[in-house]
Image (tube, helix red, strand yellow):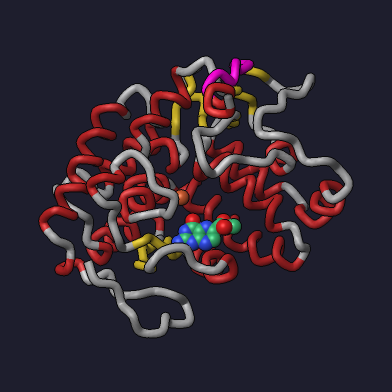
């Protein structure tokens, strides 16, 4: 599809221009949707599945953001706005702080069904938006947007970005004694929605805010460690009750942890073999 070639607006938003999507692009959404819907019962958090339902994302085709925003606004006061791709950090945070979720308006090509690096409309809408229909998670993401602006001032954005990565993007949650996926990067990926829960390869470790903020991550393959929160309430509470400025000062003096590192005081659900990462490296 065509993208708007004019200079971007200050907030980087563009019209979604829903009527522009081709039949093939809608089909790509439907294929991805069918595939993930079949995988997610019993794997995804009830909170995510409920969000899919409340937002009526099972309607065929790429969702119209205006219609989706109406439902989301009723649930939690959030909106979905279209952007051409990645936007600058400060712009991203400003949108989140104002309860606007930015979504790429393009969709991956049919030969990219399994993987692409830039967040497209399937990752952003299917992966992220269902969780935004949950009042607790919606508040957590707004808080992240507000915190992002402050983290930039403390030169600690890399630390805060790890919190987002290991929760919003790649988080696991314990529900009724079992591990479930909720991170957008997992729930929108056929491969990773199996790997994150079923494989012996990755570590699965209890979430600890400071520990997570020290942990580097990979952007080019499945994660080597996943962090498990006890509940979304606990995640929001940890973020609300933490005074981040002194934490950043403390973290500045502590070494980063490698993606696969396990510490003696970690709560370990699975001590990964790292077979997957090792086979790729070999
Ligand atoms: N832009 N569109 C888009 N989507 C993101 O997820 C995003 C972004 N810009 C910056 C960003 N994420 C992250 O680097 C921040 O969370 C740090
Ligand atoms: Fe994402």
Q: Is 84 part of what is drawn in magenta? A: no
Instruction: Using the rendered view, name the quadrant where residue 270 is placed.
Output: top right
Image x and y of residue 89, in percent: 58, 65
Whole-percent x, y for residue 246 in the image:
84, 53
Which one is in front, 106 or 252? 106
The one of 204 and 256 positioned closer to us in this rendering = 256
Which residue: 60% across, 23% down? 203
- The N terminus lies in which quarter of the figure? bottom left
272 is within the stretch colored magenta: yes
Q: Residue at x 32, y 36 (%)?
A: 49
Question: In the rendered view, would you say 169 is above or below 181?
Answer: below
Residue 265 lies in quadrant: top right
Q: How many marks?
A: 0
Q: Residue furthest bottom?
A: 7
Q: Is residue 246 left or right of residue 3?
A: right
Residue drawn at x 37%, y 63% as measured from the top left: 79
Is 273 above or below relative to 216?
above
Give the residues drawn in magenta, as a range.
Answer: 269-276
**In the rendered image, which quarter contains the C terminus?**
top right
Residue 227: in sight, yes or no?
yes
Residue nearer the viewer, 11 or 276: 276
Image coordinates for residue 255, horizontal then vertical, percent: 83, 41
Which residue occupies the foreground of this view, 224 or 254? 224
């Amino acid at each position: 599809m065509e993208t708007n070639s004019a200079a971007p607006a200050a907030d980087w938003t563009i019209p979604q221009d829903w009527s522009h999507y081709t039949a093939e692009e809608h089909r790509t959404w439907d294929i991805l949707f069918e595939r993930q819907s079949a995988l997610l019962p019993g794997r995804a958090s009830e909170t995510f599945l409920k969000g899919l339902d409340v937002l009526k994302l099972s309607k065929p085709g790429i969702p119209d953001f205006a219609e989706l925003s109406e439902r989301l606004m009723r649930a939690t006061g959030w909106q979905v706005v279209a952007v051409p791709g990645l936007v600058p950090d400060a712009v991203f945070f400003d949108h989140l702080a104002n309860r606007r979720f930015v979504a790429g308006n393009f969709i991956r090509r049919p030969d990219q069904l399994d993987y692409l690096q830039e967040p497209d409309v399937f990752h952003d809408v299917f992966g992220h938006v269902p969780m935004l229909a949950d009042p607790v998670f919606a508040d957590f993401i707004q808080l992240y947007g507000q915190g992002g602006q402050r983290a930039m001032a403390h030169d600690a954005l890399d630390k805060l970005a790890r919190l987002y990565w290991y929760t919003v993007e790649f988080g696991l949650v314990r529900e009724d004694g079992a591990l479930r996926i909720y991170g957008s990067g997992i729930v929108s990926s056929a491969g990773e929605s199996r790997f994150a829960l079923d494989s012996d390869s990755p570590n699965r470790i209890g979430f600890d805010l400071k520990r997570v903020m020290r942990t580097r991550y990979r952007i080019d393959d499945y994660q080597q460690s996943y962090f498990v929160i006890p509940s979304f309430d606990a995640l929001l509470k940890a973020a609300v009750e933490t005074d981040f400025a002194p934490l950043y000062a403390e973290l500045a003096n502590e070494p980063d942890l490698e993606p696969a590192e396990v510490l003696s005081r970690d709560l370990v659900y699975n001590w990964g073999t790292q077979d997957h990462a090792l086979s790729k490296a070999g």
